Image (cartoon, rainbow, N blue to C red):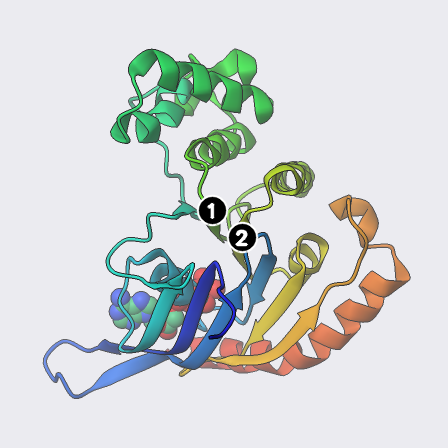
Amino acid sequence: MGAIYALELQDITCTFRSGEDRNQGYTAVGNTTLRIQAGEFVSVVGPTGCGKSTLLNIGAGLLAPSLGSVKVFGQPLEGINTRAGYMFQSEALMPWRSAIDNVMVGLQYRGVPDAEARRQAQAWLERVGLGGFGDRYPHELSGGMRKRTALAQVLALDPDIILMDEPFSALDIQTRQLMENEVLELWAAKKKAVLFITHDLDEAIAMSDRVVVLSAGPATHPIGEFVIDLPRPRDVAEVRHQPRFVELHTQIWSVLRDEVLKGYAQQLKL
Ligand SMILES: Nc1ncnc2c1ncn2[C@@H]1O[C@H](COP(=O)(O)OP(=O)(O)OP(=O)(O)O)[C@@H](O)[C@H]1O
């Protein structure tokens, strides 16, 4: 028997069928295997449009692969991955609910009584630095605060796996680094398996235990895998100045660069 992973995508191929002709299609992901251990922080980087979100959606159970299997803690995934929490690039907050009501909603959905859900949601808001902002509506919060609320919303459900798709790409660099450090602190305390999608190599190296590089599409697949042996705890702004960081960056970029150029050339053709 092999090792049990928190999330295991095995020999995944994902072809999107085009409208009329069911035999025609675009193979976004081709023959990809990706394994994440419990407590491991793995980033996936790759050129724009290569298939990163497709892989994440497959891990979330939002999309079924055309070929291959997905296992969650050793069990075949059927339907939505209920052991996982997701944080997407776009805003996921409900504009008509206050911050605390947004954080509470998942707990209520799980059947936690209102008073207890409110208590837990408030504790999570405090943990992400928004203790005094629970009554505010999303439009009354800054972009960074909305991201913090979304983070509290995900963490409140205590998922064993956290799936993040470029969660901070819309933020300014300072807010982004603050959020990255907060995520690392929260992760260090609870050690969840994290699959983090980004096109920012610096962010991937600063945050992760392992960085997986994907090829340009079509049929994207891993073309490199790097263990990030930088000591923890890390400060994402400071770690960038360490000689080992620079070394890893140079190594990974030498693999990623050509793919980024290919990916960019393909986008211009579309
Ligand atoms: N539902 C769909 N139907 C058809 N094609 C799709 C669908 N979803 C994604 N694709 C295509 O599959 C490819 C991979 O898309 P995906 O969103 O996974 O890439 P990505 O690496 O996350 O992109 P980005 O870096 O821009 O966020 C793209 O060419 C996209 O157009």
Categorize mark 2 by other alpha carbons within 10 Å: few (<14), some (14-19), many (20+).
Answer: many
Q: Nearer the viewer, residue 1 or 255?
A: 1
Q: In this figure, which residue is indicated by the disc labeled 1?
A: 160
Q: Are marks 2 and 1 in contact (CB under 8 Å)?
A: yes
Q: Residue furthest bottom?
A: 23
Q: Quadrant of the C terminus?
A: bottom left
Q: Which of 26 and 57 is in front in this view?
A: 57
- The residue drawn where x is 52% and y is 69% is 3
- N-terminal of the pair, mark 2 or mark 1, is 1
Looking at the image, is 191 positioned above or below residue 117? Answer: below
Instruction: Give percent across and percent down for residue 261.
Output: 58, 79
Q: Residue furthest right?
A: 243
Instruction: Give percent across and percent down for residue 247.
Output: 83, 70
**239 relative position to 80: left or right:** right
Q: Can residue 94 be seen in this view?
A: no
Q: Give the amino acid type for the residue marked by disc 2 in the picture.
A: Ala
Q: Which of 75 and 22 is in front in this view?
A: 75
Looking at the image, is 99 positioned above or below residue 217? Answer: above
Q: Is residue 258 visible?
A: yes
Q: Give the amino acid type for the residue marked by disc 1 in the picture.
A: Asp
SS of the residue under disc 2 = strand
Instruction: Give percent across and percent down for residue 259.
Output: 57, 80
Q: In which quarter of the image is residue 175?
A: top right
Categorize mark 1 by other alpha carbons within 10 Å: few (<14), some (14-19), many (20+).
Answer: many
- The residue drawn where x is 60% and y is 45% is 191
Q: How far apart are marks 2 and 1 (CA)?
A: 6 Å
Instruction: Give percent across and percent down for residue 97.
Output: 32, 21
Looking at the image, is 93 positioned above or below residue 55? Answer: above
Q: In this figure, which residue is indicated by the disc labeled 2?
A: 193
